[in-house]
Image: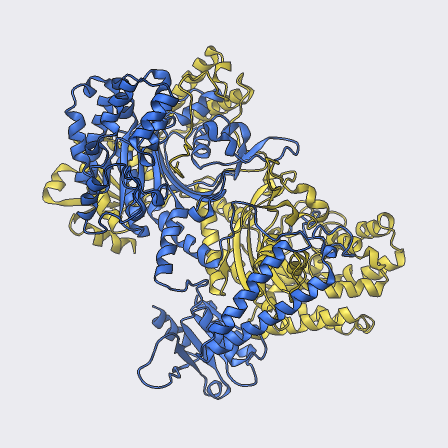
Chain colours: A yellow, B blue
């Protein structure tokens, strides 16, 4: 509602004559329909009041709740089929985050921001849309999922698709050659939404990236440490980080005899190994992509073998590959293996987190983009077991003393179809060429700005935490109010409630009261209970004369009889509440 | 960088053959240009290293800084005119918020969120775009400033223009009839940007609104209290809240004889009184809008008179209007005056903030949209004095013991052209019909959901705070790191630095070290100094053998000689630092 300049009126211009230019077409609604709806509305309101009263009196309200729900469902159906033809809704694939959900997300963000700042992260905030040409050519066939803004004259723009390309653009544009940055913001993909799985068209990403030319694996180790720290702090449950290295994969392809022009296609097939059995992936390689069967089989020896794909112990996989003489004749594979060995040293001896890492040859994600290590965090409770290897994987998980092998609908290839695609909760890798691509294109030749980063999937973190809350059957709080000020007696005591509220606000205490001059006692108690406010401050004429207020803690069952709270002097109420709130 | 499902590769697909589909056209850049740029780059890098070294040695580096700046300016010019024709930039009217700016904004948001939550506010988070029809017909002639998304099949959507319409849509869609909500988010207006004045196409709004049917002026008083609390907490300097009431203004128009069909046009003319002198506004009313001169003069008696427009004391203006017998014959004016009287009682006796309120008949903002009180907060340092009344306004301001009348370029009509339009820092009002408009249009007749709200202009708050920081010549911090771990000696001690960092991170202490195996001492000191890190933790072989680390506080000038810091046992370093960091 803020006016930006005196000459520009930005207000909502509802025309004086309501039939004039209203786009919402209220005149299309027949009067009969309106009046029916009105009476249903009234009945619902009646029921709501009754339910509140019954709850306050601690009596059974289930019959009333049922009737109300039925009426609401009917009403909502009527509305959808309604004659107005106008639907109040948000765009497809988007949702409103309501208070409880928004508050939980805020807490997730605060946890992550605290960790990012602890590691020297700097925050940047880029525009929600970029010039179209900045995003063009960056997402391959997924470019069709980019939202474009309409051409209303001037530049052509698109909504950001991720936070990585804007970050690379930022570095190149500002000539920044080293930076640790974090960015939490929404990104946009015009994909087919699957709301039940949390795949939306507007969703949050939380990215932390380290840009700069440093010694090998030092920033990489810290990124992985941060990821582990974050998932631990967010308390998402047991998790594993699958790790691989692009140069090792390239080496395997070279060794197997994959033609250079097929590398991308083949690595994209390998990327499906967490969803499809090897037989299907092999078929894609040979039948669809024309690879020799012998070549595919050689790849299979590395990415399809149990011992290599699922063994939780990174050191053993590393040792197996280091002992592979043929593989070590390939320069890139040798470099990749040296990186991993160094990384494991840092993670084990300096940071003590190697047990969270699984070295997984079947992880191939984002090969066109990454140039070094790649990784993906999997929450074990919901992770798909590795194809044809669920039995081998189970002991590793059970070894941590938590969940053993899942009892799920595992198909003949060992793939649990029910959990496919819901396990990955964070991902990232090293990308050393992206920033330069921008800088060079803009005509400025710079030193390389190598980067390594991670993106944490907030929507999945949220889904896990929300699911747990539901399982605990706790009603989520929608606000943080600590004290509800209510009045007893006919006078209402509005100015007195206001004055006490002001006193508490000035002391930083979260306080509310009802915006009625003479509110009913039961309505006030109901509001305090609904909002799960911890303390109720009771103002009543007799106590006020004595200069005291009664403070009652809610939700605490007392051993004996009615709890009337504690009388506290108005002069001391701030200190009293501060002490009890901690 | 997060992969959303195993079947969808969202990576950046940089083609294997770089000439293939790259949209950034690096092949358009002549080689000669590239090599010139490369040598300039090298020189700049040389200079940067030299400047750092000089700074570490506390020697004068101004010559080097100058040369570097000149080279960078030339380089940036070359880039713009460059043969590639490709510009690395953000879309017109948008900016990247860099770390120092983003951090300051984060602090502003945290302050506001703390206040909003203290008053029982619930946070919601709506999509950045809405269905086009939700925004249609809400912004009058400013609708042309709405950003539309391209029609890529499916629904037509537009970027949100403010946070009020999405809030009203949310209430109507969810059948919510009472709610205190806050929302801090970016909004979008395809306006002509004036970056120097902070008018951008993408900018933040911070809104707090109270929806629900309550007793008169109770939520209104709290909204104004919150606004005053917020501006005080943000420390924006002396401010005043200009207040008016739509019903009083309507009454004045009725009394003056404005035809009903001209009310909107005339109130929009009145709205310009903070920018234009009365003579111009009158001309707009009579010549442009065809109002009788006699009618305009009668309006002028109310909105143009010194005593009514500028007197800071709301009570006196109220008394003058209450004593106006003719005005009190108009029902709406009488209702408005009763509202104001009640509001003033709450603000004075319960909340003690009436001295911040100025009752200003010339404030007419958003009349098409608001139905009750309206207000606008003006920071006095940058507020335009009321036309033809600067002398009357000055004593009121001076009376608060702060800034007296400004010495500015006041024109013949008393308008300070240099400050026009930069004074308003927050605004809002009561709007009782908006939610219903949605509900009714969707075919659901509901009780009214009256609302009152305020929107705080973050960009202006930011501009004021940033200006002050510049005036104090303080270099803003870009990160929050508290401890920089550095190593002395040839060994580099990377694992030891990592281990100490891990120990500090685990204790929640913000710590960094350089990502080099064997970093140079001066480079490490320079980084710690650049980032204004408070403590340096020095690891050296001799101390490590003793199990100690030296902790040195930066930026503290010691009375005598070199400060080598304090030796602290590695076992106690966490407790030591926690105590010193407080």
Q: Residue furthest left?
A: A545
Residue B554 or A369: which is nearer the viewer?
Answer: B554
Give the image location of residue B512, x and y in percent: 49, 70
User: What residue is shown at x 39% (from left), y 36% (from top)?
Assistant: A1
Give the image location of residue A341, x and y in percent: 67, 73
Q: Is residue B46 visible?
A: yes
Give the image location of residue A287, x and y in percent: 87, 48
Residue A184 or A381: which is nearer the viewer?
Answer: A184
User: What residue is shown at x 60% (from left), y 73% (from top)?
Assistant: A346
Residue B241 or A167: which is nearer the viewer?
Answer: B241
Query: Image height check: is B229 above or below B284?
Result: below
How many numbered discs, if any?
A: 0
Position of residue B199 in the picture relative to residue B117 (left or right) = right
Give the image location of residue A497, x and y in percent: 21, 39
Position of residue A176 in the picture relative to residue A272 (left or right) = left
Query: Which quarter shows the N terminus of chain B?
Result: bottom right
Query: Image height check: is A535 above or below B453?
Result: below
Position of residue B189 in the picture relative to residue A307 (left or right) = left
Q: Is residue A245 visible?
A: no
Query: Which quarter shows the C terminus of chain B?
Result: bottom left
User: What residue is shown at x 21% (from left), y 47% (from top)?
Assistant: A503
Query: Image height check: is B372 above or below A284?
Result: above
């Amino acid at each position: 509602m803020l006016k930006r300049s005196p000459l520009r009126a930005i207000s909502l211009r509802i025309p004086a004559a309501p039939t004039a230019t209203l786009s919402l077409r209220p005149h299309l609604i027949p009067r009969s329909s309106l009046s029916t709806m009105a009476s249903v509305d009234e009945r619902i309101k009646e029921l709501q009041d009754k339910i509140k009263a019954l709850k306050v009196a601690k009596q059974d309200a289930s019959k009333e709740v049922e009737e109300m729900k039925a009426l609401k469902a009917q009403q909502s159906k009527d509305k959808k089929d309604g004659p107005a033809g106008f639907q109040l809704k948000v765009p497809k694939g988007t949702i409103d985050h309501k208070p409880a959900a928004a508050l939980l997300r805020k807490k997730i963000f605060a946890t992550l921001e605290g960790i990012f700042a602890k590691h020297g992260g700097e925050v940047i905030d880029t525009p929600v849309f970029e010039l179209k040409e900045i995003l063009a050519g960056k997402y391959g066939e997924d470019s069709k999922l980019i939202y474009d803004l309409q051409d209303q004259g001037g530049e052509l723009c698109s909504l950001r698709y991720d936070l990585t390309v804007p970050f690379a653009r930022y570095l190149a544009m500002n000539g920044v050659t080293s930076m640790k940055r974090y960015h939490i913001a929404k990104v946009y993909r015009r994909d087919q939404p699957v709301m039940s799985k949390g795949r939306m068209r507007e969703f949050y990403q939380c990215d932390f990236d380290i840009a700069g030319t440093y010694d090998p694996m030092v920033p990489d180790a810290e990124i992985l440490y941060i990821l582990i720290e974050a998932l631990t702090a967010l308390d998402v449950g047991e998790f594993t980080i699958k790790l691989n290295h692009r140069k090792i994969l390239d080496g395997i392809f070279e060794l197997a005899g994959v033609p250079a022009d097929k590398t991308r296609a083949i690595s994209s097939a390998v990327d499906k190994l967490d969803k499809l059995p090897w037989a299907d992936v092999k078929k894609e390689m040979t039948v669809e992509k024309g690879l020799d069967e012998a070549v595919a089989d050689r790849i299979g020896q590395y990415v399809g073998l149990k011992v290599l794909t699922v063994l939780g112990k990174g050191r053993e996989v590393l040792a197996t590959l280091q002992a592979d003489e043929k593989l070590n004749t390939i320069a890139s594979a040798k470099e990749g293996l040296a990186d991993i060995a160094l990384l494991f040293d840092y993670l084990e001896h300096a940071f003590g987190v190697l047990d969270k890492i699984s070295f997984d040859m079947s992880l191939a994600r984002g090969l066109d983009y990454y140039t070094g290590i790649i990784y993906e965090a999997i929450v074990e409770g919901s992770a798909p077991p590795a194809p044809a290897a669920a039995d081998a994987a189970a002991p590793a998980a059970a070894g941590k003393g938590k969940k053993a092998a899942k009892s799920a609908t595992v198909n003949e290839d060992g793939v649990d179809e029910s959990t496919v695609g819901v396990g990955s909760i964070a991902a990232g890798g090293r990308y050393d060429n992206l920033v330069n691509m921008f800088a060079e294109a803009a005509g400025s030749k710079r030193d390389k700005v190598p980067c390594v980063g991670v993106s944490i999937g907030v929507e999945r973190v949220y889904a896990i935490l929300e699911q747990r809350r539901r399982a605990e059957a706790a009603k989520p709080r929608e606000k943080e109010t600590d004290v509800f000020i209510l009045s007893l007696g006919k006078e209402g005591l509005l100015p007195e409630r206001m004055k006490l509220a002001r006193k508490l606000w000035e002391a930083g205490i979260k306080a509310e009261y009802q915006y009625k001059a003479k509110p009913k006692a039961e309505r006030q108690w109901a509001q305090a209970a609904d909002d799960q406010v911890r303390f109720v401050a009771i103002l009543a004429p007799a106590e006020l004369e004595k200069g005291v207020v009664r403070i009652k803690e809610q939700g605490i069952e007392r051993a004996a009889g009615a709890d009337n709270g504690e009388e506290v002097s108005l002069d001391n109420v701030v200190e009293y509440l501060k002490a009890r709130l901690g």
